[in-house]
């Protein structure tokens, strides 16, 4: 396993997806407001972190690989703050397009006594224009032409960056260049990701995307749903994360459920980002799909032990993986 993790250091991963700023207001609660039946949070500290597809990039970076992000942000104060956060993490902005009149997505979480009290979202989910799509794809092409890209991650949060046209263009280019494509989908584009390497929804996304109810404890229901999805997408592999029930992997080599590892769950925010980053690096490093789902599922569980959206710690994951293999 040490050799696998060492190979991560040689990988360049392109992340195409909706980026955002995760802002945290930490405080304590000792009274209820006289104005309304809500808690009053006395602020102790406030911090902003990279979120969304940028958190996937942080996970890729934390595991030792080189991430490159392609996305849109607003031509606003928050957009400039996002660029500063990128710079602070030594992440390139060569794939970032600033769009006039479009707000930069910011999710603000108010936390008191390690408990999230409220989340405030400032965003738009309007699809980018055809002109902006062309600009974004030009950045993708330039990045792929200028260096060896080992995998492309589509990190879709339904905030408007990823359109059907951008998917077609990018997947088409990836196939020509023999680049692995991995998808963390959302509802809007769920069935547009045709012919990708790995399609990784969670159970909620699978239900919404196929518009059917699925009881994951009835194996045949899950298998039938994935068979339906496979016929529509023709993906090489489909991995469905099932929270406390683990994860399910389906490929030409077979089907397998990997059980979850019991954890002290503090916060599930960002776990999906960690899973997709870990799975992508494992596949790009040449690991088989069933070992990949085992490691990715383990990584997702580890970050749930921390409050807030945090990237995986490479040394911690490696130590846990060595116990498994």
Image (tube, rainbow, N blue to C red):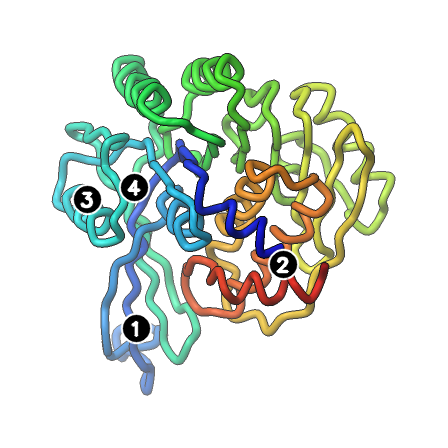
Helix, strand or loop for disc 2: helix
Residue 122 visible (yes or no): no
Helix, strand or loop for disc 1: strand
User: Residue 306, how many percent across, how many down?
Assistant: 47, 69
Numbered tag placed on residue 26 in the rendering: 1
If you read the primary sequence from the N terminus, does the residue marked by circle 3 or circle 4 appear first? Answer: 3
Which numbered mark, 2 or 1, is in the foreground of this view? 2
- Could you tell whether 256 is left or right of 169 in the image? right
* Residue at the image position 63 percent from the left and 58 percent from the top: 298
Which numbered mark, 1 or 3, is in the foreground of this view? 3
User: Residue 77, how many percent across, how many down?
Assistant: 12, 45
Q: Quadrant of residue 14?
A: top left
Task: Write down the residue under mark 3.
Answer: 83
Label 1 Cα neighbours within 10 Å, binned few <14 / some 14-19 / many ≥20? many
Quarter of the image with the C terminus is bottom right
Asked if marks 1 and 4 touch (Cβ < 8 Å), the reply is no
């Amino acid at each position: 396993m040490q050799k696998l993790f060492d190979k991560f250091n040689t990988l360049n991963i392109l992340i195409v997806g909706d980026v955002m700023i995760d802002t945290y207001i930490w405080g304590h609660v000792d009274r209820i407001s006289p104005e309304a039946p809500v808690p009053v949070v006395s602020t102790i500290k406030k911090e902003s972190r990279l979120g969304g597809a940028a958190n996937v990039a942080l996970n890729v970076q934390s595991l030792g690989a080189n991430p490159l992000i392609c996305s849109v942000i607003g031509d606003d104060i928050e957009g400039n703050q996002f660029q500063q956060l990128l710079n602070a993490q030594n992440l390139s902005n060569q794939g970032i397009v600033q769009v006039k009149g479009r707000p930069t997505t910011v999710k603000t979480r108010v936390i008191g006594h390690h408990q999230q009290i409220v989340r405030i979202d400032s965003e738009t989910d309007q699809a980018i224009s055809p002109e902006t799509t062309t600009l974004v794809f030009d950045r993708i092409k330039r990045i792929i032409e200028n260096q060896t890209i080992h995998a492309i991650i589509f990190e879709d949060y339904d905030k408007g960056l990823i359109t059907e046209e951008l998917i077609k263009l990018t997947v088409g280019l990836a196939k020509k260049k023999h680049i692995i494509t991995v998808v963390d989908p959302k509802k809007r584009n769920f069935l547009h990701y045709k012919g990708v390497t790995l399609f990784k929804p969670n159970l909620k996304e699978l239900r919404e995307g196929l518009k059917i109810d699925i009881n994951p404890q009835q194996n045949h229901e899950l298998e039938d749903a994935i068979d339906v999805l496979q016929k529509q997408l023709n993906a090489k592999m489909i991995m469905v994360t099932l929270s406390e029930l683990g994860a399910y992997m389906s490929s030409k080599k077979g089907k397998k459920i990997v059980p979850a590892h019991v954890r002290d769950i503090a916060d599930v925010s960002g776990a999906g980002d960690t899973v997709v980053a870990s799975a992508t690096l494992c596949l790009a490093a040449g690991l088989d799909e069933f070992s990949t789902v085992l490691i990715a599922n383990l990584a997702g569980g580890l970050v749930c032990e921390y409050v807030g959206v945090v990237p995986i710690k490479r040394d911690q994951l490696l130590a846990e993986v060595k116990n498994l293999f």
